Image: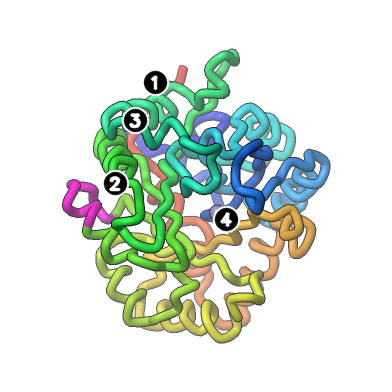
Amino acid sequence: MDKLITTVLGPVAPSELGVIDAHTHVWIEPVIGGADDAPVLNDDAMIMAGLVVYRESGGSALVDCQPATVGRDGNVLRRLAQASGVHLIACTGFHRQRYYVPAPPLWEMSAESTADLFMRELTVGLTETLDSMQPVRAGFIKIAGEATLAATPLHLLEAAAIACRATACAILMHTEKGAAVEAFLQFFIDHNVDPQRLVFCHVDKRADFGFHSEMAQSGAVLEYDTFFRPKYDPEHNVWPLLDKMITVGLASQIALATDMAEASMWRNPGPAAFPAVIHARLAAMNVPQTTINHLMGHNIAMRLAKPVRKEAYS
Ligand SMILES: [Zn+2]
């Protein structure tokens, strides 16, 4: 059995992918009745143009972090991947409750039936693509933590743990600026999830080196994405933190990303800033090319890759 990454166009060997933005958003349909401030990303021409420039600038794949019923459209992702030549990886899972319409069904379901739904999207197809000739499969489980473990829906975390154990798919977890990662990590260890399957997102918003080195040593991957967010003062936070993590030899536990959920970010700096600007900056810091490749693609590819029988896709 080979280890393969499930993209929206089918399985791909990790070695076929180069630069990968480890957490971003390619398409977000408006959610009628959801949060007023929820991002919308559905300008087809702008997104298509951004994807082409991303590829021309050295980008290979993008990890789309929008789960079902809060804006995901697997049919659109498939079309954009085909037309742009950029590999897209879609997700199953769940977002923060505030982004759903009131009383979302997932909150009423059991952990077991939710896990079944996640596994169906990972192994058969995303719900909105099941009627098409070639359903699009999810490549990972995206979940969302609140500021504390207690405020996070535990049955949905449990569902993610069940689906992860059954499929070996990676779990990418939204965190509220890195809050409670220690508790989430312990939850998954207690539920027999290998920390190697876990990616904690947005943790550079908590740029505390002690916390980062401790979490990295658990085996989990830490996703950094504030490079183009002046609000989080990247010059004084993520860049020095990243420099220190590389210096102490923990670059293998970090995946870089941009989290461009806002249409304004797709316009400026645009998705191509990831392969262009971040790569140039790391090179200027004299980070070895192998390490740059790990931070900008290899590390997340190794987490997204899982044992799959290629025949299963034919
Ligand atoms: Zn995101």
CA neighbours of label 2 inside 10 A, class few (<14), some (14 to 19), many (20+):
some
- Is residue 20 in sight in this rendering? no
> In the rendered structure, does residue 191 fall within the stretch colored magenta?
yes
Q: Look at the numbered discs 2 and 1 and tell me whether their residues touch, using CB distance below 8 Å.
A: no
Which residues, given as a range, are shown in magenta? 187-195
Q: Are marks 4 and 1 in contact (CB under 8 Å)?
A: no
Identity, as a three-letter code, of the amino acid under mark 1: Ala
As drawn, 192 above or below 287: above
Mark 3, Cα crowd under 10 Å, few <14 / some 14-19 / many 20+, is some
Counting residues from the start of the chain, the first of labels 3 and 2 encountered is 3
Q: Residue at x 43, y 39 (%)?
A: 93
The quadrant of the rendered image in which ligand 1 is seen is: bottom right
Disc assigned to residue 109: 3
Viewed as shown, does residue 144 lie left or right of 167? right
**Quadrant containing the N terminus in the rendered view:** top left
Badge nearest the viewer, 1 or 3: 3
Kindly identify the amino acid type of the residue bearing the numbered disc 2. Answer: Leu
| Residue at the spot of label 4 | 21
Which residue has dot 1 on it?
Answer: 312
Say few, some or many: other residues with alpha carbon within 10 Å of mark 4 (under 14 / 14 to 19 / 20 or more): many
Q: Secondary structure at mark 1?
A: helix
Distance from disc 3 to disc 2, alpha carbons, whole Å, reads 12 Å
Tag on residue 154? Answer: 2
